[in-house]
Amino acid sequence: MFPFTLNESERDWQTGPYEGVELKIMRKDEATGGVTVLRKFHAGVTVPAHIHPDANETAYVLSGEWEESGTVYTAGTLFYAPRGEPHGPHVARTEVVSLTIFDGPLTVQSVD
């Protein structure tokens, strides 16, 4: 038996770090600050280029069409961004839902 089990219906969507992005925090590691989240990007949302200075990010697209550097990705795509590496902009061509793991605190800094 797993020591932690949760159904996503037990969590509510929360406002994300960008307008048009929502998060469901599925699990938080109190020791590292890392989180496992469902992220929902509303259709048409563009998330500007940014970095996560305190965590590596692994994102798996569950549904939708996601554009990155002129290429459209769909369900089944995995993205990985090392801590401190710029990535984006991301464009949600349709509503996109991803399962995303940050192995440290979810902090965001814009890339100028």
Image: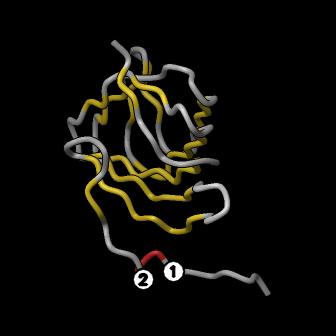
Mark 1: amino acid: Asn
Residue at image position (55%, 59%) is 36
Local secondary structure at mark 1: loop
Q: Name the residue tied to disc 2.
A: 10
In the rendered image, the vertical position of residue 45 relative to residue 20, given as above or below: above
In percent of width and height, residue 56 lies at: 62, 37
Q: Which mark is residue 7?
A: 1
The image quarter containing residue 22 is bottom left
In percent of width and height, residue 45 lies at: 23, 36
Cβ–Cβ below 8 Å for labels 2 and 1?
yes
Q: For the residue carrying disc 1, how many other residues have a C-alpha within 10 Å: few (<14), some (14-19), or many (20+)?
A: few
In percent of width and height, residue 18 lies at: 26, 41
Residue at image position (36%, 58%) is 23
Local secondary structure at mark 2: helix
In terms of depth relative to the viewer, which is nearer, 110 or 70? Answer: 110
Residue at image position (33%, 12%) is 112
Q: Residue furthest bottom?
A: 1
In terms of depth relative to the viewer, which is nearer, 112 or 64? Answer: 112
In terms of depth relative to the viewer, which is nearer, 89 or 74? Answer: 89
Mark 2: amino acid: Glu
Residue at image position (20%, 43%) is 19
* 92 lies left or right of 2: left
* 44 lies left or right of 112: left
